[in-house]
Amino acid sequence: MRHLPVVFVMGPTASGKTSLAMELVQRLDADIISVDSAMIYRTMDIGTAKPTADELARAPHALIDLLDPSQSWSVGEFCASAQSLIERSHRQGRVPLLTGGTMMYFRAFESGLNALPQADADTRAQINQQADTVGWPALHAELERLDPEAAARIHPNDAQRIQRALEVFRVSGRPISAIHNETTHPLPYPVLKFALSVGERSTLHERIHQRFDQMIELGFVDEVASLHARGDLHADLPSIRCVGYRQLWAYLEGDIGLADAITRGKTATRQLAKRQLTWLRSSRDLTTVDPLSPSAAQTVAEVIQAAVG
């Protein structure tokens, strides 16, 4: 069944990816595979905009609720899991819908994995200690000397990506940008890629703000407080570094006030959306879809059905 396509439903945060994918499974013999590095965590439901239990009953999503927030998840593990799920869908004559906003996963899965070294706890601890002393902009300057190509893509305050780029260099002795350009085993299926675009950037920002406010109303602060109260989690874990969680964690630590945390959370979400849009603009062979159009799901379904034959 290798002639069946793999469908990517991509877009910035708050653009309506989940809603569109759920409509598609009502129209097609299709399975949703989540491409979201935050939805993999159990008990992190509100801040990740995870589908509700009722929504999951109507349209099951694979690759959510896999891990405890204390655990980590690599792009390699995602690719291996997604590959297995795609094979299963194809054996059943169904179309896999990869839906989400973690663009690194999409890129790795379509182009093939590169030989990035595994995370090294000691090296990360050294980098974090250095950052506490000199600040992340100074470490970004170090990265610029070691790997100008990676530094050009990473903001001087993007601690997570600076840390990973320096970690890769210190562990392997090679720039992360050079390793990213080496791929193996590209996806052996035809790929249909749909990018959701809500039009004006101001419209997307309004949706982001509205959704963040709604998450607060639904109990987002209490959700993060429950994680904070466990005692075995900390701010440097991938789960707690997720947008929104990081800012509310700082509030619970007493570093900032709640209003400031909410403002920072919205700002960080807009910055995430900007990075996602930048990635989408660099991607090829995209079909752009207006998720606010009443005919969006029907239009996408027709393209997929034509490809399936």
Image: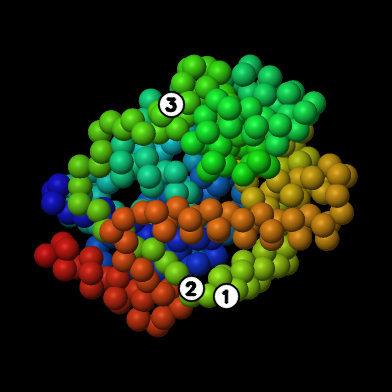
Labels 1 and 2 touching (C-beta < 8 A): yes
- Separation of disc 2 and disc 3 at Cα? 34 Å
Going by the picture, which residue comes out furthest to the bottom?
294
Viewer-side residue, 176 vs 82: 176
Q: In this view, does 169 lie to the left or right of 254?
A: left
Q: Residues within 10 Å of mark 3 (few under 14, many from 20)?
A: some
Secondary structure under tag 2 reads: loop
Picture coordinates of residue 64 (x, y %)? 48, 48
- Judge whether 186 appears above or below 98 on screen: above
In the rendered view of the protein, which quadrant contains the C terminus? bottom left
Q: Position of residue 173 (x, y in %)?
A: 49, 17
The three-letter amino acid code for the residue at tag 1 is Thr
User: Foreground residue, 99 or 198?
Assistant: 198
Q: What element carries label 3?
A: loop
Q: Mark 1 points at which residue?
A: 203
Which comes before the other along the chain, label 1 or label 2? 2
Q: Distance between the residues labelled 1 and 2?
A: 7 Å
Which is nearer the N-term, disc 3 or disc 1?
3
Residue positioned 48% across, 26% down in the render? 175
Q: Cβ–Cβ below 8 Å for labels 3 and 1?
A: no
Q: Distance between the residues labelled 3 and 1?
A: 37 Å
Residue 83 located left or right of residue 246: left
Which mark identifies residue 116?
A: 3
